[in-house]
Structures are given as C-alpha cells and as structure tokens.
Amino acid sequence: MEIVANVLVGLVAALHAYILVMEMFLWQKKPGRGLHGFDPEMARATAPMAANQGLYNGFLAAGLVWGLIAADPTGFRAQVFFLCCVVVAGVFGAATANRRILFAQAVPGALALGAVLIAG
C-alpha cells in the first residue's frame, strides 16, 4: 500500500506543478486561455491573480515532494499536512469558483490522503 500511496502523492504533486506552469507561465497563451475560456484581454487582466495562484500551487507541489523524500515521521507528516491543504483548497475552490475543482483537485488529494493514512 505504501507504493500506491507514494504514486498517488506523486501524481497530486505533478498535478499541482502542472497548475503552476499553466497559471504562472501559460495563462496568456492559448493553453492557459483555453483552460478557462478566456479571451486575450481577460487573460491579460487576470494574469497577476493567476500567477499568485500558481505560486501557491507550486508550494503544494513542493511540500508533497518534500513529504515523499523526507524520512519518517517528517515525510508522513508533511504528506498528510499538504494533502489536507490540497483537499481544503479544492473544496473551497469548488464552492467559490468552479465545481470542477472538486473533481480535479479535492478528490485526487483525498484519495492520496486516504492511501497515505492507510499505509502509515
């Protein structure tokens, strides 16, 4: 079960690294605009906000990677903490911005958190 947990944590970390790239570097380009259906003007106007969000997603990814490479009990605790952050952010985003965030962020985070807790 530990291997499954590590793979799920790695996938959630990769997802948040992807979000970082989309929000910080590709927001005004076609892939970033297509993610939310923004025209170039709206993408330009919201780019600073998106970059800020991207940075936070990068912190989540970094924390999860730290949890994967740190020795226990630190690694386990870091994974639990950052996965809880992912789940809370996903639920909040779904409630306030877009319901899809629940399935794109909170559900994968919750699955990984469950696997980490079972394996731990």
Image (spheres, rainbow, N blue to C red):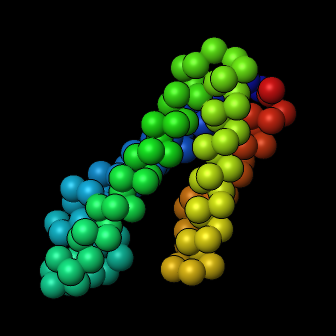
In the rendered image, which quarter is residue 87 located in? bottom right
In this picture, residue 93 sits left or right of residue 120: left
In this picture, residue 91 sits left or right of residue 63: right
Q: Is residue 32 above or below residue 21?
A: below
Residue at figure coordinates x 29%, y 61% from the top left: 51
Position of the C terminus, as image quadrant, is top right
Q: Residue furthest right?
A: 118
Q: Is residue 10 above or below residue 29?
A: above
Visible in this render: residue 40? yes
Visible in this render: residue 31? no
For this rendering, which residue is in front, 5 or 74?
Answer: 74
In this picture, residue 30 sits left or right of residue 73: left
Q: Is residue 71 above or below residue 2?
A: above
Residue at figure coordinates x 30%, y 51% from the top left: 21
Q: Position of residue 56 (x, y in %)?
A: 43, 54
Position of the N terminus, as image quadrant, is top right
In the rendered image, which quarter is residue 37 located in? bottom left
In this picture, residue 35 sits left or right of residue 60: left
Residue at figure coordinates x 21%, y 80% from the top left: 45
Figure label count: 0
Q: Position of residue 7 (x, y in %)?
A: 60, 31
For this rendering, which residue is in front, 66 or 15?
Answer: 66
Q: Position of residue 49 (x, y in %)?
A: 32, 70
Q: Position of residue 39 (x, y in %)?
A: 20, 84
Q: Residue furthest top?
A: 71
